[in-house]
Image (spheres, grey):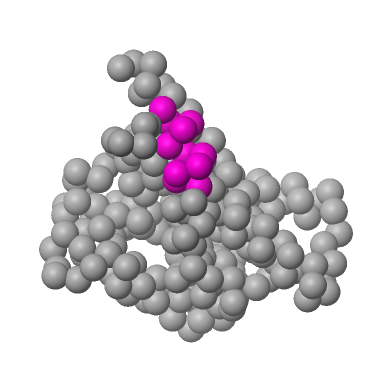
Amino acid sequence: MKANTMRRFLVMLIGIIILGLGIAMFKISLMGNDPSSAFVMAVGDRIGVDFSRVLICANTVWFIMEALLGRKYIGLGTFVNWFGVGTIASLFVNYISAQWEISQSFGIRFMIMLVGILVLSLASSMYQTADMGIAPYDALSLILTDRMPIPYFWCRIFTDSICAVVAFLFGGIVGFGTLVCAVGLGPFISFFNKNVSEKLCGISSNE
């Protein structure tokens, strides 16, 4: 049992590191981040505060709701995601920007975004399959699903749409990448669940 827990913890931790890379790739592509990240980046740019710090503050607010209404979703992964993702994403953005001059051509940026979709999907699959706790923002749509007769898909669309609107109002980049993240990651995540994450976590196909 302890070995399996450690195995899942490592999968979760690696997944969150990869998640930071995925967010960084979307930011560098300038084609729109996932809705929650786009919201946080837009607010950070408006008030002149780094993305990682704004994300920690936003997660604090979302965690209060998770603690009050969805305590069952809280685990170690909740806190690693809460304090780690923003910092990791900022480190990746700074490192990549310092090491390479990113072309501003549409083709290059589009390719970066496409790779970012796969990276973000793999990361989300690993972190969710490890089942070590749900991130504060991700818990919001699950809480809505628990308390309302509405499928998870639409609850997630609702929370993502609010973030996208706020990001747009704050002058953030809401583009094709944002749309893909809001409605199109599901099939990729399902693929990685079956072919990568469940195997890494030691989950058999009949569990």
Instruction: Write the residue at 70% across / 66% down.
Output: 29
**Picture layout, residue 173 above or below residue 16:** below
**Quadrant containing the C terminus in the rendered view:** top left
Q: Residue furthest top?
A: 2
Image coordinates of residue 2 in percent, x first then y, are: 34, 16
* 165 on left or right of 22: left
Q: Residue furthest bottom?
A: 169
Instruction: Write the residue at 46% across / 33% down.
Output: 199
Instruction: Write the residue at 39% across / 45% down.
Output: 128
* 167 on left or right of 72: right
Pick whichever, 110 or 100, lies toward us. 110
Question: Does the magenta portion include 195?
Answer: yes
Quarter-wise, where is residue 71 in the image? top left
Pick whichever, 9 or 71, lies toward us. 9
Q: Which residues are magenta?
A: 192-202
**Picture layout, residue 65 above or below residue 148:** above
User: What count of labels does the image hold?
Assistant: 0
Residue 19 appears in the figure: yes
Pick whichever, 133 or 61, lies toward us. 133
* 189 on left or right of 157: right
